[in-house]
Image (cartoon, coloured by chain):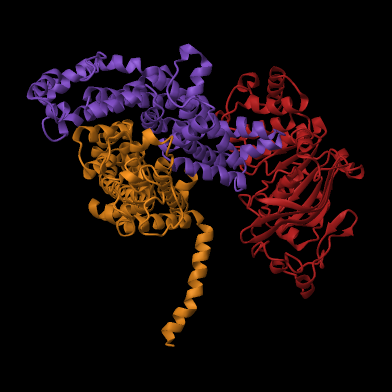
Chain colours: A orange, B purple, C red
Amino acid sequence: MSEAAIAAEEARPGRLKAFGTFARRNPTIVIGAVLLAFMVTLALLAPLITNPPMQASPADRLKPPDFSNFFDPEKRDRFGTDNLGRDIFARTLHGARVSLMVGLSVAILATVIGLAIGLVAGYYRRVDAVVMRLMDGLMSIPSILLAIALVALTRGGLLLLIIAITIPEVPRVVRLVRAVVLAVRERPFVDAAISVGSRSRKIIIRHVLPMTVAPLIVQATYICASAILIEAGLSFLGAGVPPEIATWGNMIAQSRLFFARAPWLIFFPGAALALVVLAVNLLGDGLRDRLDPRLARRM
Amino acid sequence: MGAYIARRLIATIPVMLVVAVCVFLLLHLTPGDPAAVLAGDNATSDQVAQIRAQLGLDEPLWRQFGMWLWRLMQGDLGESLFWGKPVLDLVLERAEPTISLALTTITFAVIIAVSLGVLAAWQAGTLVDRLIMGFAVLGFSVPVFVVGYVLIFVFAINLRWVPVQGYTPLAEGVGPWLERLVLPSIALGLAYVALIARITRASMLEVLAEDYVRTAQAKGVATRPMLTRHALKNAAVPIVTVVGIGVALLIGGVVITETVFNIPGVGRLVVDAIQRRDYPIIQGCILIFSAVYVLVNLLVDISYTFFDPRIRY
Amino acid sequence: MNLVEPEMQVATAVKPILEVEDLRTHFFTRDGVTRAVDGVSFTVAPGETLGIVGESGCGKSVTALSILRLLPARLGRIVGGSVRFEGQELLSLPEGRMRDIRGNRVAMIFQEPMTSLNPVLTIGDQIAEAVMIHQGASRSDALRRAAEMLRLVRIPDAEKRVGDYPHQFSGGMRQRVMIAMALSCSPRLLIADEPTTALDVTVQAQILKLMLELKQATGSAVMLITHDLGVIAETCQRVIVMYAGRVVEQAEVLELFDAPLHPYTRGLMASIPRIGLGRRKRLAEIPGIVPDLRKPIVGCAFAPRCPIASARCRAEPPPLAEHRPGHLAACWHAGEMP
C-alpha cells in the first residue's frame, strides 16, 4: 500500500467521525439534505423507472394502491390508478420533476434579481427611496393572487409560471440584502475603503457581497419551499402548469371529484409535496442555525 | 397618537398607489391585444370589440390609468365581464363567508399558536419543545389543500362529525355557522399557527433570559403570571408583527381553502374569474386584498404602543 | 463613613435566621461540570449585615441565587448541602412554598437596575405585585403601599410616579425602586447582589446609605454581595471572603481589616485605593487568574497565585479553621507574611 493510500485509509474513520459530529450537531441539515437528495434522485430517474405518466388505461380505472410485487417494472398500481387508469406512482415521480425545477428556478432567479436590486438600493441613497416604496407595494400584493393574475392573463407555459412566482418573492430578498448593505456601510473598514478612494463597485464586490452570502443561502432555501407550495397551489386552482402535465397540484385538482372513493389520488401526491417542502424547510432551518446565529435567534 | 395614525394612513397612500399601478399594468404588459386575451380563444371579433370598448382599451395608456384611478377613488372597481355587475357588489355579496373564515381562523390560530410558542419556550430543549417545533415545521410544509382534503376525508366522510363542505350564514345560528367553519379554519390556519408559534418561541426565549424575569421570580411570582404578564407582554412586538405579515399567507390560503371546502366567498369569486378570464374581478379582488393587508399591518404598527410603553409617536 | 451602629455588632450571638451548610451548586455545560459553588457554609444572624466579597466568578452571586433557588434549571443545579431559613430547610421545599418565601420573607436586589425592572409594567404595578401576592392586598391597597414605599426610598412625587414606567427613571432611581420593591413586604432577610456596582460613585453612597437606614427601620438582616472591600468596610458587621466557589476567610469587619489571615484577602486589601490615590480600582489586581472551575482543584485553589504557597498548599486543600476567636481562614499559612 502506498503512503498516500495508508493516509487515506487512516483519514477515513476520522472523516466519518467528523461527519457523525456534524450530523449530531446539525441534525436538521442532515435529515433535510438526505430527504431532499432521495426525492431529487427519484425525480431524475422517473423516466427510466416508471411508466409514461400520461398513459391512460380505461380498464384499470381507480385501482387502489397495491404494494405487493412493488418492484415489478410492469406494475401500474403501486400507488393505485386514477379515473383514467393512469399510474399514480409514475405521475407522482414525474410531478417531483416539475416541483423541484420550479422551486430551484424561482430560488435562483429571485435571489439574483433581489441581490442586484438590493445592492443598488442599499448603496445609492437616491435610488433607495424609490425602490423600497416599489418593494413595499409589491409586498402588499398577496403573492398567490399576483401569480394567479399573471398566469390567468397569459396562459403561458412553465417559464411564465416561474416568472410569476418569482416576482412576489423578489422584495423579500431586496429587503434582506439592503439591510445587510446598510449594516456593512456602518462598519469602519468600509469607511476606510471609501477614504482611500475605492470605487463603490469595488467596495460592493469586496466587502458587501461576501456578507450577503450566508443570509441569502438561507433565504433562497425558504423561497424554494414557498415556490413549490405556490406552484402546487396555482396548479390546484387551475392557474398553473397546463393540466396535461403531471404535477402534484394538477393531480390533486383533477382528483377532486373522486377523492371520497379514491383517497389515494390525493394522498400520494399530497404526501410527496409535503415531504419535499419539509425537506427543504428542514434544510433551511438547519442552515440558518448554522450560518446565521443572529438571524436564528430572531426567527 | 391621532397625528401619528393620520401620518401612517398618509404613508399607505404611495404603497397603495404602487399596488394600483402594478395591478393596472398587469393587463397591459401581457403580450398581445388585451381585449383579445380577455375575450378568450373562441371569441368573435364583435365580442373583442365590445370588451375593448367596455374597458376603454382604445384610449392611450396614461388616460386609461387616470380614468381607472379616478373611478377607483369613487369606489368603482369596474364591472364584471361575465356577470355584468359591478365588481364591488359581487365582492360584498360574497364577503360574509370570507370574513367569517378569516376571523375565526385568526382568532383560534393566534390563541393556539401563542400558547404553543410560550410552552415551547418555557420548556425549551425538552421533548415538548421539540414536538411543538417539529409540528411547526410540518405545518409550514403541508399545503392548505392537502390538509383540507385529509380533514374532509377523516372527519367529514369517515367519522361524520361535521358537514363535508359549504357554508352556513351566521344568520342561521352560531352553531351551524361554526360547525362548517371548523375544518376550513384548521386547514387555513395550520401554516399561520406554525409561523406564529415559531416567532413566539424565539421572542419568548429572548425575554425569558432577561433580568426582569428573574426579578419577578425573586418576588414570588408564580409561573403562569411570570410567563404571561411579565414575559409575553415583552415578547409581544415581534409576535404581532408576524401576525400582521402572516395575513398575506392567509389571503393566499383563503382562495385555496374556499375552493377545497366549496365556500362561496371572495376567494371562490377570484378562482371562478380565472377560469372565465373575468379580469376586472381579478383586478378588483387583488386591490381589495392588498388594501386589507396594508390596513392590518397599519393596525399592527399602532398596536405596538399598547404593548410597549417605550414606543411613543 | 461608618454606618454600623455599635449595638448591632453583638447580633451574631443569637440564633441565626439563615444557615447555609456545605452548599454545592454545579453548572452542567457541554464542556463539563463547573463547580461554581463548592461547599460553602455560613450563617446570618437576625438584623445582621453580612458581606460576601470576592472577584467576579468566585461564586458569590450563584450562592445568593441558590439560596432563593432562582438558578435557571437549564444552567445550574444545587447538588448538595443545606439552606435553612428560620430553621426551615429551603432546598427540599416544594416550589409553591418556596414562592411564598421569595419576595416575602427573603427578598433580593440585583446588580443591574437598568435591566432588572420590567420595561412594560408600571413601577407601581411592579412594587404592588409582591404585596398582592404575599399579603393578599387588593390592587388599590397594594398601589397605595407602593406609593408609600416610593416615598420611603425618597422618590419625589411618589404618588404620581407609581404610574410611570422604568424608562422614565434614572439608574439610581431605578435601584431605589428595586429597594422599595424588595422591602415592600418587610422581609426578614434582604439579599443584595452588587446593588451599587452599576451606579455612579456618588449615587453608590446614597443607595447604600438608604439601604442600611431602611434595614434598621425594618430590622431585617442583609446579605450584601460585592467585589468592593471598601463597600464592606462601610456597611457590614461580618465578612465572608470567597474564592473559586469556596469560603476562604470569615471574620468581623474590624478584625478582618486589622488582621487579615488569608493571603488572598490581603491581596484584595492591597487593591483598595487609599484616599487621594485617585479612582477606586477593581479587584483583579492580584497577579494570575482565577482557576478553571471545570477541572478538579487539588490543594488550595489560590495556590497558583499565592506569594507564600508551599508544597503542602498544592497537594492538600486547607480546611476552614478558627485561627482566632470568630476569625476563620482556609489557609495552611494563615497569618504568615510573604
Please name whichever residue, A130 or B173, is drawn nearer the observer in this view of the structure: B173
Which x, y percent locates residue A187?
Answer: 37, 50
What residue is at 72 percent from the left and 36 percent from the top?
Answer: C209
Q: How many numbered marks appear?
A: 0
Which x, y percent locates residue C82?
Answer: 83, 49
State which quadrant residue B283 falls in: top left
Q: Is residue A223 visible?
A: yes
Q: Is residue C206 visible?
A: no
Q: Residue furthest front?
A: A59
Which x, y percent locates residue B83?
Answer: 24, 17
What residue is at 88 percent from the left and 42 percent from the top?
Answer: C87
Up-down: is A48 above or below C175?
below
Direction from residue C219 to residue C165 in the image, left or right: left
Up-down: is A65 above or below B2?
below
Q: Residue furthest top?
A: B171
Q: Residue furthest bottom?
A: A1
Query: The N terminus of chain B is located in which quarter?
Result: top left
Direction from residue C131 to residue A172 in the image, left or right: left
Up-down: is A245 above or below C131?
below
Up-down: is C324 above or below C214?
below
Which x, y percent locates residue B291?
Answer: 33, 24
Query: The C terminus of chain B is located in which quarter?
Result: top left
State which quadrant residue C185 falls in: top right
Please name whichever residue, C19 or C10, is drawn nearer the observer in this view of the structure: C19
Please name whichever residue, B153 or C337, is drawn nearer the observer in this view of the structure: B153
What residue is at 47 percent from the left and 79 percent from the top?
Answer: A9
